[in-house]
Image: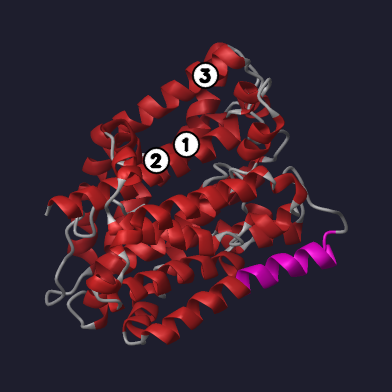
Amino acid sequence: MAQKRTRVAALTGARAIAGLYILALHFGAPLYAHAPGWAQTLRANGYVATSFFLMLSGFVLMQAYGQRLADGRVGQRAFFVQRLARLYPCYLLALVLMIPFALVRHWGFVTGTFGDATVRYKLATFAAQATMTHVWVPRLVTSWNVPSWCVSVELWFYLAFPTVAALLVARRGRALVAVLALAWAATLAMSIAYTVLQPDGFHAEVESVGFWLSLLKFTPYTRWPELLFGMALGALWLRVPDAHRGRRWATLLLGSGALATVGVLVCGDRIPYTLLHNGALLPLYGLIVWGLMLGVGPLHRALSVRPLTTVGDASYVLYILQVPLMQWMAVATGRRYGAGGFAFTAAALAITIAASVAIHHLFEVRAQAWLRARLERRLLRVDEPALGLVAAGPNLP
C-alpha cells in the first residue's frame, strides 16, 4: 500500500512541474530577462508540456478505466458523465471570469483578449467555448480562454475512449508497441508535413498565427495521437507482469528520460518550432511515466514532497485559470497585460499558484460532486452503475 501511495505522489509531483512549466511559458518571461540563453530557450519551449499532459491523461485513464470499460463493469455513458463532471466546473469558471473583458471594451483591449472584436463575434465565440466545440474550427480556437483548447480536445476524445480502450486491452504486447510507434509516427508526420510545406506561407515561430498552424497545434484532428500513445502505454503497463516491468531500473528510466527531454529543449532553438510542438518527445515522456510508475528511488521521493503534490493536485485549476487570473491582476493593478516587471511577475505568479490551490479545495471538488450527482440522475440508466469522482485516483487531469 505504501508503494502505491509513493507512485501516485510521484506522478502528482510530475504534473505539478509540467503545470508550472506551462505557467512559466505563458507569463514567466520577465523572470528570465537576465538568465543565460539556455534557460530562456528552456522556458520558451514550455509548450511541450501540453503534449505531456495529453499523453499522461491517456495513460492514467487507461489504468483507471481500461479493464473496467472492456469487461462492461463501467458503461460508456457513466464514463463520459464522470469525465464531464471532472472537467467542466473549472472550465466554466474560467469562461465566466473572462466575461467582464468582453463587456468592458477598455478591459478587453488592455488585456488583449478581444481588441476591436464585434459583439457578434464575442457571442459566437462564447457559445463555441461554452460547448467546447471551438476546437473543431481552427479560427475560433484562440478566442476567450486560450488554454481551454487542450481540455476540449480531451473531452471529445472521451467519446471514443471506451471503444479504443476495449480494443487496446485485448491486444498483446507487440501489437501495443506497434500502436505506440504508429501514434508517434502520425504526430511526427503531421508536424514534418507542415514544416516542409509551410501551408500558411511562412516559417512558423512561437508567436505565428495562421489557419493551418492553428489546426496543427490546437485541434483534435492532430492531437489525438498523443492521447492514443498514452492509452497504448497504459495498456502495455497492464499487460506486462509486475516482475517484468523493470523496477530496478526505475531511477535510470526516470532520470534518463528527464535529462534527455531537458537536453532536447535546451537545444530547442535549433529545432523547427512546428516539429517540436506536438508529440515529438512522446518516447521520452513514455520513459518518464514508466519510470515514475515503478515508484522507487530518490527521484520519486523528490517528486513526492508535499509542496509539489499540493500543486499537482491543483494542476488542472492552475492550467485552466491562469489566463483569467493573470488578466484580472493586470486590470486590478492598472498594468497592461503581459507588461509586468520582475517583482510584479513573481508576485502575480505566486498569487496565481496559491489561488489555484485554494480554488481546488474550496470550489473544484465540491462543484465536481454537485455536477456529477445531477448528471448521473439525468443521464444514467437505472441499471448502469455510477462512478465515484475519485474512482480513478488523484492523478487524473
Q: Which residue is mark 2?
A: 16
Q: Is residue 250 above or below residue 269?
A: below
Query: Horizontally, is 343 left or right of 68 in the view?
Result: right
Confirm or deny contact between disc 1 and disc 3 (CB under 8 A): no
Confirm or deny contact between disc 2 and disc 1 (CB under 8 A): yes
**Given the image, on which type of amino acid does mark 1 rest?**
Leu
Q: Which residue is mark 3?
A: 346
* Crowd class of label 3 (few under 14; some 14 to 19; many from 20; radius 10 Å): some
* Crowd class of label 1 (few under 14; some 14 to 19; many from 20; radius 10 Å): many
Query: Horizontally, is 72 left or right of 215 in the view?
Result: left
Which sits earlier in the primary sequence, circle 1 or circle 3? 1
* Crowd class of label 2 (few under 14; some 14 to 19; many from 20; radius 10 Å): many
Q: Which residue is mark 1?
A: 20
Q: Is residue 356 above or below residue 70?
A: above
Q: Is residue 290 above or below residue 298?
A: below
Return the residue nearer the eye: 269 or 146.
Answer: 269
**Residue 199: in magenta span:** yes
Q: Which residues are magenta?
A: 186-200
Tell me the distance, in whole angstroms, between the alpha carbons under discs 1 and 3: 13 Å
Residue 270, how many percent across, how many down?
Answer: 76, 49
- Image quadrant where one finds the N terminus: bottom left
Q: Is residue 36 above or below residue 176?
A: above
